[in-house]
Amino acid sequence: MNPLAGQLNQSIQAGNQHVFDMLSPLGREIYFPKEGILSQSAEAGTLAKKYNATIGIATENGGPMHLNVIQEKLSAYRPQDLYPYAPPAGKPELRAVWRSKMLNENPTLADRSFGNPIVTNALTHGLSIVADLFVNEGDAVIYPDKNWENYELTFGIRRHGRLVNYPLFTADMKFNSDGLREALLNQKDSGKAIVLLNFPNNPTGYTPGAEEGEAIVSAIRDAAEAGINVVVVTDDAYFGLFFENSLTESLFGRLAGLHPRVLAIKVDGATKEEYVWGFRVGFITYASDSQEVLTALEQKTLGIIRATISSGPHPSQTFVLDALKSEDFRPQQEEKFEVMKGRANKVKALLDSGQYEGAWEYYPFNSGYFMCLKLKDANAEQLRTHLLNQYGVGTIALGETDLRIAFSCIAEDNLEDLFNLIYQGVQDLRSS
């Protein structure tokens, strides 16, 4: 093992032995080089006043070399904020601004100990870092039966985690915290579990209320008190899009510092919140009462980044930072929020109108981009293909009965026509 990795491991053990026990073999072996090209370039950047022949970019006229055919389209930005490599952890100012944003939107974090957000290449990359650092072959990775399918690839296929699902909803359509507790306590023999909490949920668009949130925290605390080390990840991809009767903070704040056996990790980003899907700017943030643990986890995360993508894209980090600092950011974000809320409310009004009686029920939704129909007597995949081929309508089939509808990409005025066509598709299948 590299001595740097050994030093990081010793720091984590000194700060919290349980967190060290959570690390995968890769997580224990990874480190960020302190004496390699990056560190030597950083040193030269400070001291090489005459010639700096270390950096792996081309320069010209005192700045980064670039093509005017590109720069003329991006002339609002300085070349040095676009073309050089961004630091592996991301632009320092962006990290600081995002941390302030987290505190403003999650007051519970005010008295919690958590690290500086590290920039990732959007949320999937953040989840992949979690998988690399903490998932060993056979480790239980626990998340609901209604989930984003990429979890299986990221945690199951890539890291050979053992995927454990529980029903998302109870019979009265509340979050199934008892199912989560049971899935966790079943891991007592192995003594470790990774829990994924995704709210607003993809595919259902559901976010728990305050009482349900407390029950989730209680289930995780119970597992920790039973001797299980729990890595709990809040996948906050759609954070902020809370339309009615739900938590409006990430559970990361309630989970930070919950128990020595609980490591809370927040994965979030500008992708969905700021409507910049192609920019690929996300963040990963760790919570711990030990500064030694936070520093060591950051270094190991930078090691993963260095070994995979080296660093995230610089231009999109600059664009996001510029937007977050603008006085127009909040008003414009609020304007888009109202559009999304209007679409969600329209869908709910249509579904509650009675005009589609007998065709489906719907799962609770109060946030995010999506909602899910539960078809009564039609096969979801058959309906999906029929809608596509007969009416030019695209939907997502999930299992035998569930059909996901992304109201996020349908204008409010077109929603009734959309659901009328889906209903007609059900009638077509019945008659055939």
Image (cartoon, rainbow, N blue to C red):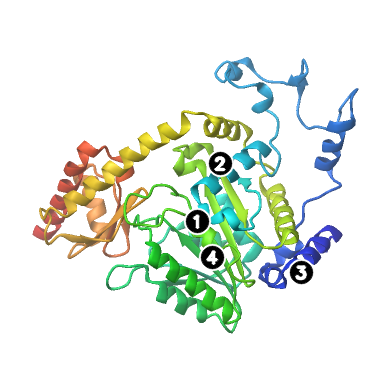
Give the quadrant of the N terminus. Answer: bottom right
Left or right for 71, reference 106: right
Q: Select label 4 or label 3 by which is in front.
A: 3
Q: Select label 2 or label 4 by which is in front.
A: 2
Q: Residue at x 16, y 46 (%)?
A: 421
Q: CA distance from mark 2 to mark 4?
A: 24 Å
Mark 1: amino acid: Asp
Kindly indicate the quadrant of the structure image that contains residue 340.
top left
Q: Specify which label sits upstream in the sequence, 1 or 2.
A: 1
Q: CA distance from mark 4 to mark 3?
A: 27 Å
Q: Specify which label sits upstream in the sequence, 1 or 4.
A: 4
Question: Residue 156, which numbered label?
Answer: 4
Cβ–Cβ under 8 Å for marks 1 and 4? no
Mark 2: amino acid: Val
Q: Residue at x 57, y 53 (%)?
A: 110
**On the image, numbered disc 2 is attached to which residue?**
281
Q: Is residue 316 visible?
A: yes
Is disc 4 surrounded by few (<14), some (14 to 19) or many (20+) residues within 10 Å?
Answer: many
Q: CA distance from mark 1 to mark 2?
A: 14 Å
Question: Residue 388, which numbered label?
Answer: none
**On the image, numbered disc 3 is attached to which residue?**
13
**On the image, numbered disc 1 is attached to which residue?**
235
Q: Specify which label sits upstream in the sequence, 1 or 3.
A: 3
